[in-house]
Amino acid sequence: MRAEPEKFAREWVNAWNSHDLDAIMAHYDADVILISPVAGRILDNPSGTVVGSAALRNYFKRGLELFPDLHFELLDVLWGISSIVVCYKNHSGGKTAELMEFGGNGKVIRVVANHSAAPRSA
């Protein structure tokens, strides 16, 4: 069971490290909801909530533009019934854990991102 979540996490990190927006978005459902303090800061939205794949794509595009040296290092993957937690370190040394819940189609439907200290990247 653990091999599948680790494979997903490696592919997800590789997509981010390639800065390929289509490859990144391939992991997410059309009705995805993301909650992140970084999204709150970048989008000037105190709730940090991004709803739907079009809004998520715009947020990710903006993040990639703001942080051209963005790079993630996978640290750990935790798995549950229909969710995983991807733990990684970003290019500025900050640690993040993202809880990702999956829908029946195998795509991420909900993300809750948690960061060490003050978030500095997307």
Image: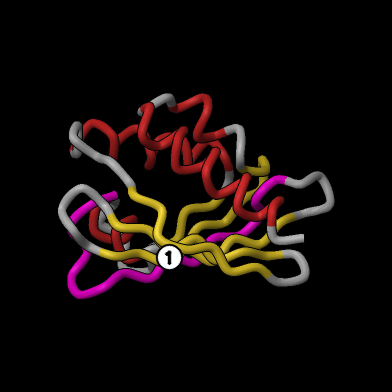
For image coordinates 19% across by 37% down, the residue present is: 66
Image point 38% across, 27% down: which residue?
18
Residue range highlighted in magenta = 107-122
**Dot 1 alpha-carbon crowd within 10 angstroms: few under 14, some 14 to 19, many 20 or more:** many
Dot 1 falls on a residue whose secondary structure is: strand
From the viewer's perspective, tell me whether residue 103 is left or right of residue 34: right
Quarter residue 58 falls in: top left
Residue that sits furthest to the bottom in the current view: 117
Instruction: Name the spot of residue 69 as percent of width and height, x first.
Output: 18, 35
Q: Looking at this rendering, what residue extends furthest in the right direction? A: 104
Which kind of residue does numbered mark 1 sit on? Ala
Give the answer, above or below, for where 120 lies relative to 15: below
Residue drawn at (51%, 24%), measured in percent from left and top? 22
Residue located at (54% from left, 34% from top): 25
Answer with left or right where residue 36 lies relative to residue 100: left
Q: Name the residue under label 1.
A: 113
Q: Residue 57: x percent and y percent?
A: 46, 35
Q: Tally the numbered discs.
A: 1
- Does residue 37 appear in this view? yes
Q: Is residue 40 left or right of residue 1?
A: left
Q: Percent x, y for residue 122? A: 29, 49
Task: State the residue in front, 70 or 25.
Answer: 70
User: Is residue 112 magenta-colored?
Assistant: yes
Which of the image's four quarters has the N terminus?
A: bottom right
Front residue of this view, candidates 2 and 55:
2
Image coords of residue 117 (percent x, y): 20, 75
